[in-house]
Image (cartoon, rainbow, N blue to C red):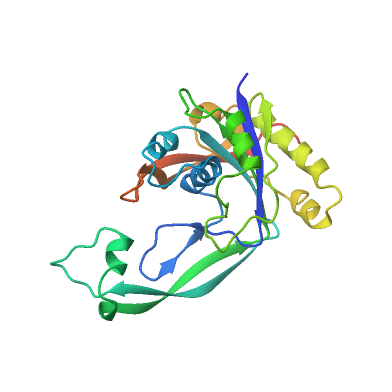
């Protein structure tokens, strides 16, 4: 039987950043793979400059069930300092930009998107030769090494992740998660209302996990980290569908 690590995510604000184009930083309503890997690696205490982080990022599958019926969207404004364009002096990182002479920096007005009142149930599955087993990651989520946040540092967790281990198929893991967290929050009317709202959509990563799901589409997301120092990502397939069995 396959072991899965199940955990919940809820925060007043969530922002799963898409690629920044110009002055607008859009947010997807579904967590990116890189964000979930970052959450787990931060809990484990893996630093961003640790050479082992690239090995960590090549393993594990994530499946997501978002509860978005009660969500709302909004945008706020940030100021950003950046140097004037200079083709003769390429800048490869954000550090290269800000270490320039302050007098050469210009201030730009940028936009950031957020969602609120979105609750997620996440199923994490280890792959072959994964550097950490799901039991180790479960313990890390219970006692994280570094502060955890949801996409941005201004989005702290509003609930414990409450990780649990389940053995079985991916679809059965979602059924178990639904029952477990309904019972876990039966005395909390706010979270109970979110969990009891309509949440028929499921997102998963690997074609072998399609059993017991009705596939409706396959989409590409460029959120698989391939080089942390250069901030490079590659495309991956994300499968979207509904659970075949009744819940």
Please state which of residues 142 and 35 is positioned toward the viewer in this rendering.
142
**Percent coordinates x, y for residue 217 in the rendering:** 51, 42
* x and y, in percent, of residue 18 in the image: 44, 57
Q: Image point 60% across, 42% down: which residue?
A: 64
- Between 185 and 22, the residue placed more toward the observer is 185
The quadrant holding residue 114 is: bottom right
Q: Tag count in the figure?
A: 0
- Residue drawn at (47%, 29%), measured in percent from left and top? 131
**Left or right of 225 in this view: 124:** right
**In the picture, residue 40 is in which quadrant?**
top right
The quadrant of the rendering that contains the C terminus is top right
- Give the farthest residue toward the bottom: 103
Whether residue 240 is situated above or below residue 89 in the rendered picture: above
Instruction: Tell me where residue 90 sits by quadrant.
Output: bottom left
Residue 182 in percent (x, y) is at 80, 43
**In-front residue for pair 54/128:** 54
Q: Is residue 92 above or below residue 112?
A: above
Q: Position of residue 97 (x, y in %)?
A: 29, 67
Q: Can residue 241 be seen in this view?
A: yes
Q: Residue most toward the top? A: 1
Q: In this view, does 222 lie to the left or right of 181?
A: left
* Residue 212 visible here: no
Q: In this view, does 88 lie to the left or right of 229?
A: left
Q: Residue furthest right?
A: 187
Residue at horizontal 46 percent and vertical 72 percent from the top: 111
Q: In which quarter of the image is the N terminus?
A: top right
Q: Which residue occupies 55% across, 27% down?
A: 133
């Amino acid at each position: 039987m396959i072991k899965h690590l199940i955990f919940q995510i809820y925060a007043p604000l969530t922002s799963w950043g898409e690629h920044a184009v110009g002055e607008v930083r859009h947010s997807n309503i579904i967590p990116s793979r890189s964000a979930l890997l970052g959450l787990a690696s931060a809990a484990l205490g893996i630093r961003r400059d640790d050479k082992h982080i690239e090995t960590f990022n090549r393993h594990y599958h994530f499946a997501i069930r978002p509860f978005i019926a009660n969500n709302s969207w909004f945008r706020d404004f940030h100021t950003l300092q950046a140097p004037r364009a200079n083709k003769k002096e390429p800048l490869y990182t954000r550090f290269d930009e800000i270490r320039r002479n302050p007098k050469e920096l210009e201030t730009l007005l940028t936009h950031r998107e957020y969602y609120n009142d979105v609750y997620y149930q996440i199923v994490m599955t280890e792959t072959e030769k994964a550097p950490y087993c799901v039991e180790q990651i479960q313990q890390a989520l219970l006692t994280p090494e570094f502060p955890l946040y949801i996409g941005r540092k201004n989005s702290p967790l509003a609930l414990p992740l409450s990780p649990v281990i389940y053995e079985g198929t991916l679809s059965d893991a979602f059924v178990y998660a639904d029952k477990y967290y309904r019972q876990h929050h039966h005395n909390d009317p706010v979270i109970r209302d979110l969990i009891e709202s309509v949440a028929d959509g499921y997102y998963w990563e690997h074609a072998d996990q399609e059993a017991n799901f009705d596939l409706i589409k396959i989409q590409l997301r460029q959120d698989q980290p391939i080089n942390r120092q250069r901030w490079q990502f590659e495309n991956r397939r994300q499968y979207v569908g509904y659970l075949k069995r009744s819940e």
